[in-house]
């Protein structure tokens, strides 16, 4: 992310130097180091380590972070593997052929998990996360559309992509960076997710595809992919337009196969041509890994593929990056072996059970009203019950919870519900029933405190934008 030093790095009155704790300073060493300039001289490794270690500690307590989807814990064997393999560069297929082979095993497993008709003849890749994976999925949709239009002698200058107004920001980036018109279908109280309703008024001959989200970031709800596919079937029958679906399964593609095995959302639907997931969300790996798989080779146009040499042979690659850590791929493989289908089921169901327990308790609180209950992905959101109070808002509740260490963001919903504020909890592996009870106690205390106020909390500050 581009940051500016005005906004993020410096705070008013902040010193320009890192002061060293005298305990760690060795004879002859500097006692402070500049923060924003490359230091003149060297430091001892122990000293530099201590500075970075101490600063990183300020980042907060991951266990009480109920805002993030991303993994913050792996077991000792994974930590060991991580250290052992931190030097591997994923693009050096020739130098690290085994890592490359393992990458292929991983996405082939995903192709099978997601019901590709012929998993051994699919194509896929690891990425740095779902954002890159979505870019690749979107680019394949765009190129397929361009190729078909060119073949038909039609213009290719006005591609559009149809999706919910509640998409993750990576889809807005995709459209911005690759000159595709985003067509947002607004969510509403009646249509809480993209559900195929009125789709015919959004798609046309310039539509490169429709994005369906398995686990909307704002709320955790699944979009009914089968229903969206059925709406597109009808559109094809009426107009001849054959519009494909990319499923953004950043979270849900690693939940649904284990928790809702009967739900039809994946390659079992002919219209679904590609699916992405974040290995670092419910794939349970540390940050830096995503996956995208196409239903078959035909779904990924050949002219997007580059070839790198691999064991003297040839390895197709499709990626935005060149160098990237290979270790995360090995960690994903470790977890696939370690947990298997049964292990992932147990882990994800545990998270789902905690989410449903928590949402049930929150539903019983007079101040709050659930938007959804966490039975899709283990994520749910609530709003302030209409008419409950004008003294406080969910932003105040979020602030209050922060005082006991909990990060539970409040934010506005997207169009057409942007006047509605919700608050969301992401239940991840490790958020136990015990922690949930500790959180509930703090939540109830915070609400009781706010409810006891005899006047409104002054709106003293702009609420920081929460990023999805
Ligand atoms: C998190 C998320 C993304 C972006 O994933 P990263 O792995 O963080 O890049 C995209 N889409 C959805 C639905 C998400 O929840």
Image (cartoon, helix red, strand yellow):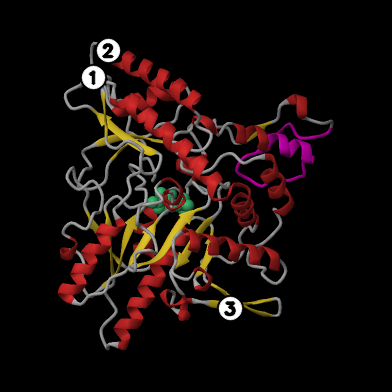
The span shown in magenta is 28-51
Q: Nearer the viewer, mark 1 or mark 3?
A: 3
- Front-lying residue, 325 or 22: 325
Mark 3 vs mark 2: in front: 3
Nearer the observer, 264 or 387: 264
Q: Earlier in the sequence, mark 3 or mark 2?
A: 3
Mark 3 nearby-residue class (10 Å; few <14, some 14–19, many ≥20): few
The residue at label 1 has a CB less than 8 Å from ligand 1: no
Q: Are marks 2 and 1 in contact (CB under 8 Å)?
A: yes
Q: Nearer the viewer, residue 206 or 348?
A: 348
Q: Is residue 426 above or below residue 266?
A: above
Q: Secondary structure at mark 3?
A: strand
Q: Is residue 47 left or right of residue 153?
A: right
Task: Determine if the magenta segment contains residue 33.
Answer: yes
Q: Residues within 10 Å of mark 1 (few under 14, many from 20)?
A: some
Residue holding disc 1? 391
The CA span between labels 2 and 1 is: 7 Å
Q: What residue did someone put label 3 on?
A: 307
Q: In the rendered structure, does residue 242 fall within the stretch colored magenta?
A: no
Q: Residue at x 35, y 40 (%)?
A: 375
């Amino acid at each position: 992310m581009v940051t500016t030093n005005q906004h993020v790095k410096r705070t008013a009155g902040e010193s320009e130097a890192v002061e060293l704790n005298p305990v760690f300073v060795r004879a002859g060493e500097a006692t402070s180091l500049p923060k924003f300039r490359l230091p003149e001289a060297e430091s001892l490794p122990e000293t530099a380590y201590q500075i970075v270690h101490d600063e990183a500690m300020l980042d907060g307590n991951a266990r009480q972070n109920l805002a993030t989807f991303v993994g913050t814990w792996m077991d000792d064997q994974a930590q060991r593997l991580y250290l052992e393999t931190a030097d591997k560069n994923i693009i050096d297929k020739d130098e690290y052929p085994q890592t490359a082979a393992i990458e292929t095993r991983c996405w082939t497993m995903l192709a099978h998990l997601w019901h590709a008709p012929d998993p051994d003849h699919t194509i896929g890749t690891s990425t740095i996360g779902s954002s890159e994976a979505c870019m690749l999925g979107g680019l394949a949709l765009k190129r397929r559309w361009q190729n078909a239009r060119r073949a038909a002698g039609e213009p290719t200058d006005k591609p559009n992509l149809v999706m919910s107004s509640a998409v993750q920001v990576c889809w807005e980036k995709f459209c911005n960076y690759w000159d595709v018109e985003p067509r947002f279908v607004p969510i509403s109280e009646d249509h809480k997710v993209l559900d195929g309703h009125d789709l015919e008024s959004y798609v046309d001959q310039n539509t490169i595809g429709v994005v369906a989200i398995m686990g909307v970031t704002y709320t955790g709800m699944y979009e009914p992919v089968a229903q969206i596919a059925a709406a597109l079937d009808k559109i094809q029958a009426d107009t001849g337009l054959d519009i494909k679906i990319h499923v953004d399964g950043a979270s849900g593609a690693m939940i649904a196969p284990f928790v809702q095995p009967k739900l039809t959302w994946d390659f079992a639907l002919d219209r679904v041509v590609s699916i992405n997931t974040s290995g670092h969300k419910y794939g349970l790996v540390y940050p830096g890994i995503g996956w995208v798989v196409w239903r078959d080779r035909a779904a990924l146009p050949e002219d997007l593929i580059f070839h790198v040499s691999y064991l003297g042979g040839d390895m197709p690659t499709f990626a935005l990056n060149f160098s990237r850590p290979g270790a995360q791929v090995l960690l994903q493989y470790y977890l696939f072996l370690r947990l298997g289908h049964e292990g992932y089921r147990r882990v994800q169901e545990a998270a789902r059970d905690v989410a449903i327990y928590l949402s049930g308790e929150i539903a019983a609180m007079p101040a709050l009203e659930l938007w959804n209950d966490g039975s899709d992905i283990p994520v749910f959101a609530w709003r302030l019950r209409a008419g409950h109070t004008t003294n406080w808002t969910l932003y105040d509740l979020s602030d209050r919870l922060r005082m006991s260490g909990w990060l539970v963001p409040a934010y506005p919903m997207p169009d057409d519900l942007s006047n509605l504020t919700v608050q969301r909890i992401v239940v991840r592996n490790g958020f136990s029933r015990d922690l949930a009870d500790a959180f509930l106690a703090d939540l109830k205390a915070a609400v009781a405190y706010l409810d006891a106020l005899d006047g409104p909390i002054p709106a003293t500050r702009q609420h920081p934008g929460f990023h999805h």
